Image (cartoon, rainbow, N blue to C red):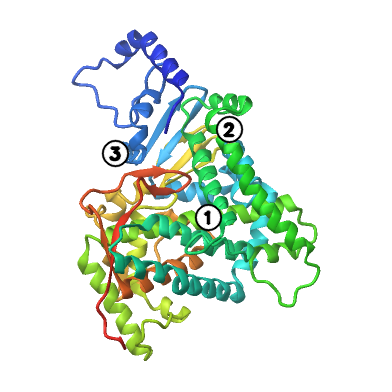
Amino acid sequence: MELLSFQSFLFFFLLVSSLSVYLRFNTTSPKKPINKGFKIYPLLGTLPEFVLNRHRFLDWTTEILSNCTTNTAVFRRPGKVQGIITANPSNVERMLKTNFENYPKGDRFITLLEDFLGRGIFNSDGELWKVQRKTASHEFNTKSLRNFVMQNVTVEVNTRLVPILAKASETARVLDLQDILERFAFDNVCKLAFNVDPGCLGGDGIAGAKFMRAFENAATLSSERFMYAVPIFVKVKRFLNVGSERRLKEAIGTVHEFADEIIRSRREQKTQKEKEEDLLSRFMANEESSPEFLRDIVISFILAGRDTTSSAMSWFFWLLSSKPDVKQNILKELENIRVRRNRKNISDAFTFDELRDMHYLHAAISEALRLYPPVPVDSKACLKDDIMPDGTFVAKGWLVTYHTYAMGRMENIWGKNCREFLPERWLENGVCRQESPFRFPVFHAGPRICLGKDMAYIQMKSIAASVMERFEIDVEKKDKGPKHLLSLTLRMKGGLPVKVTKRCVDATN
């Protein structure tokens, strides 16, 4: 992430001034044990290493945690920022379940995202969160919402995604598949949240496209706040309304304006011929819900639905490009399901029950999520002194971060082949097994476990099955792995350029 020039000046000034102290404290004899955690500098803490490795933060911290006996490391930064990062499943379970009340989102997290997400379900604690969670939990468990999701995905796939890929196959044009999937997910989640089609994929929705760009900018710029070495700079830039904070304010203004207009319009509809099934209508059933509350709710769900599924599917197709055996196994499973159900025409969309029978595809998507989780790290605040199951002491006020990306690369969790894309690790007698959410916290875990997990798999399996049956996706420069682009989710820097070719299939197969 880009740092202010003033930060760089401050960093080097402090580095030089503390050099003599550093040399004294860090000059060790060969007999002394090597510190396998973060290197702690006098006054500066882990800041120098953080600055040097900020462009490879995930891989750097994964290396650090891999070399720690407990897969947990303590960090310190200027401004009294201190805490731990862990890839230990026992610690994750304590944070997210057994000692849940001691590890809320915390004021720092909520404050940094409040102007964007408000106090929606993903940016609130305590009673406010419990009320929203209870309402959302009820709605997400209804069959009608599941059917609404299935219908929207099917329409979006058949009327937009497939035609765009078909046209690209005819012209041999290189597509940015990540961009296509993000537009697909954005249209789809807006329908789910508002029952409004922004038309970002294959549509002509100018206002929707503006909303999407503003939403993406707001998410990216908000995430940069967490990467500042000295937190006070966020407040200074916000107060002066300069640089990234000015751009963020403009982006948030566009997002809120679009959402508020939808809510105002829906409020004015006194009667409706049919009951709407979108999330906004469901939350509006509570007459006490303020416009601000409704806006916070739907923006949070758009963030969760748009960025997570598109990120997961982008990495899935990239991984699949170098695994022809996995690709063939998925295609064979899809063919077998069609034969069993006597539905041989690939233009027929898969039903919910058929999607549920796709165990190998489910395993392959889960494996992609293990290696490239959409939310690679997540932080909590510690309210009271605590001791983690691995013996690590955590003080009141510390940040406690669990590293989902690193956990997917820990040998003591997944074995020596942990860095391989191997869907078979999820299968038992041909059935995709459930993994402990504390070993695989991609969908969070405990009381805050993702309510949309099942819906996310419905969407991802629908996309994968529909695309793979019809097209061959050839990733450009597949030997060079994409670099990470850290926003609030894990995206590919530079997108995912692909060429699309129609798959040769029998007209009835």
Say which of 444 and 509 sits in front. 509
Residue 120 against residue 66 in the figure, above or below: below
Splitting the image into 4 quarters, where does residue 277 fall? bottom right
Query: Residue at label 3?
Result: 63
Query: What's under tag 1, amino acid-wise?
Result: Ala
**Disc 1 and disc 3: Cα gap in Å?**
28 Å
Query: Residue at label 1?
Result: 304
Residue 375, given in percent of the width and then of the height, sits at: 45, 49
Residue 358, given in percent of the width and then of the height, sits at: 37, 75
Q: Check residue 230 in the rendering and tell me which mark sits there, or answer none.
A: none
Please tell me which residue is depicted at 45% across the width and 59% down the height of the picture: 309
Say which of 258 and 62 sits in front. 258
Q: Quadrant of the N terminus?
A: top left
- What is the crowding at mark 3: few (fewer than 14 residues within 10 Å), some, or many (at least 20)? some
- What is the crowding at mark 2: few (fewer than 14 residues within 10 Å), some, or many (at least 20)? some
Do callouts 1 and 3 mark residues in contact (Cβ within 8 Å)?
A: no
Q: Quadrant of the C terminus?
A: bottom left
Query: What's under tag 2, amino acid-wise?
Result: Arg
Compared across the picture, whether 104 is left or right of 319 comes to right
- The mark closer to the camera, 1 or 3, is 1
Query: What's under tag 3, amino acid-wise?
Result: Glu
Label 2 element class: helix
Do callouts 3 and 2 mark residues in contact (Cβ within 8 Å)?
A: no
Disc nearer the start of the sequence (3/2): 3
Residue 297, given in percent of the width and then of the height, sits at: 65, 54
